[in-house]
Amino acid sequence: MPRLLPIVQLGDPVLRARARDVDPSGLADPKMKELIDAMRETMREAPGVGLAAPQIGLGLRLAVIEDRPASVEGLDPETRASREREAVPFHVIVNPVLTVEDSARACFFEGCLSLAGYVAVVPRALAVRVDCLDETGAPRVIRARGWYARILQHEIDHLDGVVYVDRMETRTFMAGEDYARHWADADVEDVRRILEAERRPLVP
Ligand code: ZN
């Protein structure tokens, strides 16, 4: 059983720095396999659908991603369809380069394990392409839409020192518990409209 790693929280400088490229020749090192195993278990335990190396205090351009069938099947069909959420098998992205393929905006609540307990509406591109290496150093091209595209954008942001609060609609930022209590069943467009309607000028 791989050890669980502590997840660093917003405020740790590693989350705000640009991570450095992974040297592909180092991927064969057994320590790298150990690291990836530990990141996978840490992500599952959290639980989360992605974990970037800076979130465990390592400034490396590497992330693990997995959206397990059990998480997806637990959603009601309407939510699942609107989010375009499908199960994604476990995989590793190394030195990823992201290209937006459909810049149409999808707006949904998301959270981050490094900002535990909070969520906000974050606009994300609907479809992306990611060129990266896998954990063996083999080149991979990923084409993703919907929720998977959101996960990729979120994790790759971490490698550039960007966190979702930089992109969120600030009026929708809230504690996860209150989201569950008041907003989880509402349509995201309605939530945005209601919260924006209460906006007041910040400087009188
Ligand atoms: Zn995150």
Image (cartoon, rainbow, N blue to C red):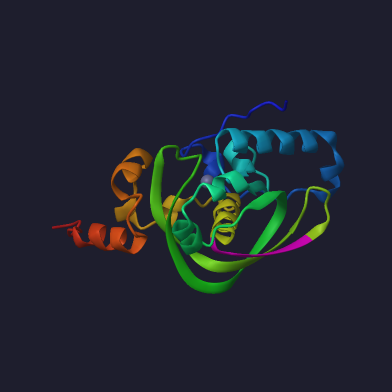
As drawn, is 179 to the left or to the right of 110?
A: left
As drawn, is 100 to the left or to the right of 139?
A: left
Of residues 189 and 70, the one drawn nearer to the viewer in this rendering: 70
Range shown magenta: 140-146
58 over 87 or under it: above or below: above
52 over 37 or under it: above or below: below
Q: Position of residue 10 (x, y in %)?
A: 47, 39
Of residues 194 and 168, the one drawn nearer to the viewer in this rendering: 194
Of residues 37 and 22, the one drawn nearer to the viewer in this rendering: 37
Q: Position of residue 165 (x, y in %)?
A: 42, 51
Q: Quadrant of residue 108?
A: bottom left
72 over 178 or under it: above or below: below
As drawn, is 193 to the left or to the right of 45?
A: left
Q: Quadrant of residue 204?
A: bottom left
Q: Quadrant of residue 198?
A: bottom left
190 over 113 or under it: above or below: below
Instruction: Please check the rendered image and state whether residue 65 is part of the magenta-colored stretch, yes or no.
Output: no
| Residue 68 in sight in this render | no
> In the picture, which quadrant includes the N terminus?
top right
Question: Image point 55% across, 35% down: which residue?
Answer: 46
How many circles with numbers are drawn on the protein? 0
Instruction: Please check the rendered image and state whether residue 144 is part of the magenta-colored stretch, yes or no.
Output: yes
Q: Position of residue 54 (x, y in %)?
A: 60, 42
> Of helix, strand and loop, which mostly describes the magenta segment?
strand
Q: Position of residue 200 (x, y in %)?
A: 17, 58
